[in-house]
Image: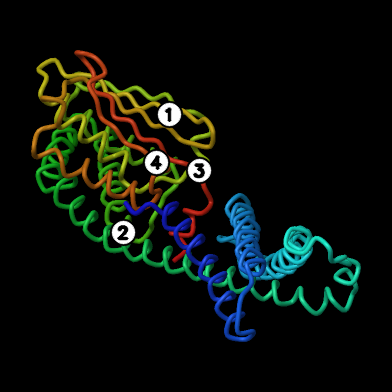
Amino acid sequence: MVNKHRIYWSLQVGGWLLYAVAQILWSFVALGSVTPRRVIFFLLEALLCLVITNWFRILLNRYKWLYMPMHKLIPRVFFSVFVMGLLIYFLRLPVTFALGKLFDPDTTIDLTQALTINQILGFSPYYVFLCFLWTVFYFIYHYFERYNTSLKYDASMIEIELNNLKSQLNPHFIFNALNSIRALVDENPSKSKQAINQLSNILRNSLASDKKGLTKFEDELKIVKDYLGLESIRFEERLKTEFDIHPDSQKFLVPPLMIQTLVENGIKHGISKLTPGGVIQLKTFVDNNHLRIHIRNSGHLLNGTKRSKGGLGLKNTVQRLKLLYGEEASFRIVNENDNFVLTEIVIPQSNTHESINRR
């Protein structure tokens, strides 16, 4: 994954250094020579612009201005650009004074003239315009970055959905579910009706999941419970389920079918391989605006990994988390002890990811 922090600082330092060099060259062309005092001034001015614009970047990210609607964003940007231009103008005055004292100590420098309305209105618009250009470039960069991420996600969702339909909800699973339901029709009609509804819900959500980037945690939890309800018909007493859901989990959005895929992975490669069966535990924690999901299943990883046929769902999960959240999310699967396998997902709570659902 590209290091966006490194790219930002490369562009930031390189851009303002190029600005200083352009100022120096222009001064040389206009005046025929450039004094060391002017060279140092242009370099310090560029450094000052770098510090102010980086401060503005921190403000943008902290208050999520990049994801605001236009009617709220535009007045904030214009006001901030105006303030930055004035800040740069006033902060450069001490630099001018210090350089004057350093290179021409016998000359009396009067700063009061620079503080007149005419001087402020004459020079500060230049810095306002400079900050406005920086802001435009910064927003354009993020717009194309988000657009590119959206395209990658769309392409990935198509592939992932096909893999889900082929490997998770395959004909073998449907065949087993229908056989289990058929056996219940005469024995327990009400339970068979419930099982048909569960299968219908799973199929409906699977076919519709390519239309949305994220889904509510509570909706995903319903699918997981429907899936486990169907599997409990097939495994009977061999499958036990446990849920411990933090109340704040409902505030989060998650990739559709992700938890169901991991639960199925635990049954397919863990519990189904054990003669006495086992337990599937789903537990969530919420701390520091992050949702931590723990899926435990009876069983054991083979040499630290799942069987080769079980890697598709895990690979898709890692890919989806990376495209959606970058480095903010994490995924791991380990042997917790000799009897249980732990699958852990950590997802951030951020309104920035909700925009994927509104494309």
Query: Real-space Cα distance between discs 4 and 3?
Result: 10 Å
Query: Real-space Cα distance between discs 1 and 4?
Result: 15 Å
Kind of residue indicated by mark 3: Gln
Residue in the picture at 80% in, 80% down:
122
Kind of residue indicated by mark 4: Ala
Query: Real-space Cα distance between discs 3 and 2?
Result: 22 Å
| Mark with earlier residue (3, 2) | 2
Element type where label 3 sits in the image: loop
Residue nearer the viewer, 314 or 276: 314
The image's mark for residue 329 is: 4
Query: Real-space Cα distance between discs 4 and 2?
Result: 21 Å
* Crowd class of label 2 (few under 14; some 14 to 19; many from 20; radius 10 Å): some
The image's mark for residue 349 is: 3
Element type where label 4 sits in the image: loop
Kind of residue indicated by mark 1: Thr
Q: Is residue 342 above or below residue 327?
A: above
Judge whether residue 198 can be spotted in this image.
yes
Do the numbered discs 2 and 1 sit on residues whose CB atoms are within 8 Å?
no
Q: Nearer the viewer, mark 1 or mark 3?
A: 3
The image's mark for residue 210 is: 2
Question: Label 1 belongs to which residue?
Answer: 284
Residue nearer the viewer, 181 or 81: 81
Please give left or right for residue 83 compared with residue 144 in the image: right
Kind of residue indicated by mark 2: Asp
Residue nearer the viewer, 343 or 211: 343
